[in-house]
C-alpha cells in the first residue's frame, strides 16, 4: 500500500524535487505551500508522515508541529536552512523525528522518510519550554551541522554525554549548549577542569568539605556537585583524573549520593554529567590509566567535535564573528577583513583550533591599523612580514609545552631566543663581538653576559 507523505514548504522548487524523489521511491505525495492549506486538508485526511520547513512567511512550521503532535499525526521530519543549535533542538523538542539541513541530499531525505515510516516512532514529548536564545556555537559545515543535530537530539534527555575533540574545538561550548537546550537550563551549569586542579584538592573541589576536614579547612565548603544540583556539571579533561578519584566519581554516579570530605551526612544529588577529553579514552583504559566502567558510564552518548582543519568552510564565518565580537566587547571601532586577508586566514593552519583562530582575530581587532584588515596585518610570509613564520612555530611550541605541563617555559624560550640571535649575529660578523652586539642593538657587555650565562647554565 502506498503511504501518504505531505510536504509543506513555501519553496516550490524544494517541494517539486522532493515530491519527485519520494514518488520514485513508490510513495504517494501531497504538496502544500502554506500552513493554512495543511490545516484545511487535515479536516479530511491524515498524512502518514509530514515533511515541513520551519521558517516560512506567515506562520511558523514549529507551531503547526505542536498541533499535529496533539492530533496524533504520524512522524514529522523538519527541513530547514537554519542549522543553529537552537532551531535544531527546538524542532526535536517539538516532536520532530529527524532534521534535514537544507540543501539536503535527496537520497538522504528519502532514506530518512523510509526510516521514520518503518519505525513509526513513539511520539516525543511536546515542547514544554520556549526556545533558548541563540548559542555562540557557530558553524555551517556538514560536520558541525551533524554536531548540532546530535545536541538537539540528546539535550532534552538526561543521558551523560562525552564530548571529544582536540583542544580548542569548542567542547565546553557544546556542554553549555546541551545544558541550555535541556530542561535543566534554569539551574546551574558548573564547569571544572580536572587537569587544572592538583589531585590532592580535587576531591574536595568535587564533593566539598566540612570544617576541620583538613588543615586550612576552616569552614564547610560546597563542592561542584552541590553547586550543580539540579543542573549540569561539566568535567573537562576527564582523561587526566587520578584513578582514586575516578573510583570515587564512579561510586557517586552509580549511587547518586556522596559525602563531603570529612562529612557524615549523605548528600543525594541530581546532576547531569557532561565530560570532555582531548585524549583517546579507550587508549587510556588500555594503558590502565582510566577505569573502563567509568568510561562506559560517561560515554553514554558521544559527541565528537571535528578539528578546524576538517571544516575549513567554517573559518571565515568564525573569523568575522570573532572580529566583530571583540570590537563590541572592547568598544573598539569595527573592522573588517579584506577579501585577500580573509582568504589567507581561511588557508592557515590552526593547531589550537577555534581558540587559536579566536586569538588571532582578537589580536587583529586590537592591533591592526585601519578599518580594513589586509594580508600584511596577519603577519604571514605572504603578507610581506617574515615574523609569522617563527612566531607561529614559537606559538606551536609553547602550546605543546604548556599542554605537556613542562616547567620554566618562559625562561627556556627566552634563552633559546637569545642564543639564536647571538649566534646568528656572531656568525654574520665573523665572531667580532663588538660588531655583533652593535648589529643586534645591544651593548657589548650584554652580549658577553648572555653568552656567559648560557655557558654556565649548560654546565
Ligand atoms: N563553533 C564555535 N563557534 C564559536 N566559538 C567557538 C566555537 N568553537 C569554539 N569556540 C570558541 O573557542 C574557544 C575554545 O572553545 P572551548 O573552550 O569550548 O574549547 P575546548 O574544546 O573545551 O578546549 P580545551 O580542550 O582546550 O578545553 C572559546 O572561546 C569558544 O568560545
Image (cartoon, rainbow, N blue to C red):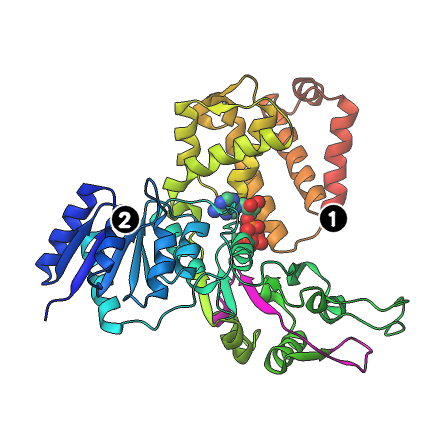
Q: CA distance from mark 1 to mark 2?
A: 85 Å
Q: Is residue 161 above or below residue 288?
A: above
Q: Identify which residue, 353 or 273, lies in the foreground.
A: 273
Name the residue located 71 percent from the left edge and 68 percent from the top edge: 226
Q: Identify which residue, 65 or 271, lies in the foreground.
A: 65
Q: Position of residue 222 (x, y in %)?
A: 77, 67
Q: Secondary structure at mark 2?
A: helix
Name the residue located 25 percent from the left edge and 43 percent from the top edge: 10
Q: Position of residue 72 (x, y in %)?
A: 32, 68
Magenta residue check for 45 = no
Q: Is residue 43 above or below residue 347?
A: below
Q: Is residue 27 above or below residue 317?
A: below
Horizontal relation, residue 274 to residue 222: left or right: left
Q: Position of residue 299 (x, y in %)?
A: 49, 71
Q: Secondary structure at mark 1?
A: loop
Name the residue located 53 percent from the left edge and 31 percent from the top edge: 323
How many neighbours does mark 1 have within 10 angstroms: few (below 14), some (14-19), or many (20 or more)? few
What mark, if any, has residue 354 been given in the picture? Answer: none
Tag nearer the camera, 1 or 2 = 2
Note whether residue 357 is visible: yes
Q: Earlier in the sequence, mark 1 or mark 2?
A: 2
Name the residue located 18 percent from the left edge and 42 percent from the top edge: 13
Q: Position of residue 35 (x, y in %)?
A: 29, 49
Residue 441, image quadrant: top right
Query: What residue span does the magenta drawing correspond to?
Result: 259-282
| Mark 2 sits near ligand 1, with its Cβ under 8 Å away | no
Residue tagged by mark 2?
A: 36
Q: Quadrant of the N terminus?
A: bottom left
Q: Is residue 10 above or below residue 50?
A: above
What mark, if any, has residue 459 been given in the picture? Answer: 1
Amino acid at each position: 500500500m502506498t503511504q501518504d507523505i505531505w510536504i509543506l514548504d513555501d519553496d516550490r522548487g524544494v517541494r517539486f524535487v522532493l515530491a519527485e524523489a519520494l514518488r520514485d521511491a513508490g510513495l504517494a505525495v501531497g504538496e502544500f505551500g502554506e500552513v493554512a492549506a495543511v490545516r484545511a486538508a487535515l479536516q479530511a485526511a491524515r498524512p502518514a508522515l509530514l515533511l515541513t520547513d520551519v521558517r516560512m512567511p506567515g506562520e511558523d512550521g514549529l507551531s503547526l508541529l505542536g498541533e499535529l503532535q496533539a492530533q496524533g499525526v504520524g512522524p514529522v521530519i523538519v527541513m530547514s536552512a537554519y542549522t543553529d543549535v537552537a532551531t535544531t533542538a527546538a524542532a526535536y523538542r517539538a516532536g520532530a523525528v529527524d532534521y534535514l539541513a537544507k540543501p539536503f541530499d535527496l537520497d538522504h531525505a528519502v532514506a530518512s522518510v523510509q526510516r521514520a515510516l518503518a519505525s513509526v516512532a513513539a511520539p516525543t514529548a511536546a515542547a514544554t519550554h520556549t526556545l533558548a536564545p541563540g548559542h555562540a556555537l557557530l558553524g555551517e559545515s556538514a560536520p558541525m551541522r551533524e554536531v548540532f543535530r546530535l545536541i538537539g537530539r540528546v539535550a532534552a534527555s538526561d543521558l551523560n554525554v562525552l564530548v571529544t575533540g582536540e583542544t580548542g574545538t569548542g567542547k565546553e561550548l557544546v556542554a553549555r549548549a546541551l545544558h541550555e537546550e535541556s530542561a535543566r537550563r534554569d539551574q546551574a551549569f558548573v564547569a571544572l577542569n580536572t587537569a587544572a586542579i592538583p589531585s590532592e584538592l580535587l576531591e574536595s573541589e568535587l564533593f566539598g568539605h566540612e570544617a576541620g576536614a583538613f588543615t586550612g579547612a576552616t569552614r564547610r565548603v560546597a563542592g561542584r556537585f552541590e553547586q550543580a544540583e539540579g543542573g549540569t556539571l561539566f568535567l573537562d579533561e576527564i582523561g587526566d583524573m587520578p584513578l582514586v578519584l575516578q573510583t570515587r566519581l564512579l561510586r557517586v554516579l552509580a549511587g547518586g549520593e556522596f559525602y563531603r570530605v570529612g562529612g557524615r551526612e549523605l548528600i543525594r544529588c541530581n546532576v547531569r554529567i557532561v565530560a570532555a577529553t582531548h585524549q583517546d579514552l579507550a587508549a587510556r583504559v588500555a594503558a590502565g590509566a582510566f577505569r573502563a566502567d567509568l568510561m562506559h558510564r560517561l560515554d553514554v552518548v558521544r559527541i565528537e567535535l571535528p578539528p578546524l582543519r576538517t571544516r575549513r568552510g567554517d573559518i571565515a564565518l568564525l573569523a568575522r564573528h570573532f572580529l566583530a565580537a571583540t570590537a563590541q566587547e572592547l568598544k573598539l571601532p569595527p573592522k573588517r577583513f579584506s577579501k585577500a586577508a580573509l582568504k589567507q586566514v581561511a588557508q592557515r593552519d590552526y593547531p589550537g583550533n577555534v581558540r587559536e583562530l579566536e586569538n588571532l582575530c582578537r589580536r587583529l581587532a586590537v592591533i591592526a591599523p585601519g578599518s580594513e584588515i589586509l594580508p600584511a596585518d596577519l603577519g604571514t610570509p605572504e603578507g610581506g612580514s617574515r615574523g609569522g613564520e617563527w612566531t607561529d612555530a614559537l606559538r606551536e611550541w609553547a602550546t605543546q609545552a604548556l599542554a605537556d605541563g613542562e616547567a620554566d617555559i618562559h625562561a627556556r624560550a627566552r634563552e633559546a631566543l637569545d642564543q639564536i640571535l647571538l649566534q646568528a649575529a656572531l656568525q654574520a660578523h665573523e665572531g667580532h663581538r663588538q660588531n655583533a652586539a652593535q648589529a643586534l642593538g645591544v651593548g657589548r657587555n650584554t652580549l658577553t653576559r648572555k653568552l656567559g650565562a648560557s655557558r654556565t647554565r649548560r654546565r
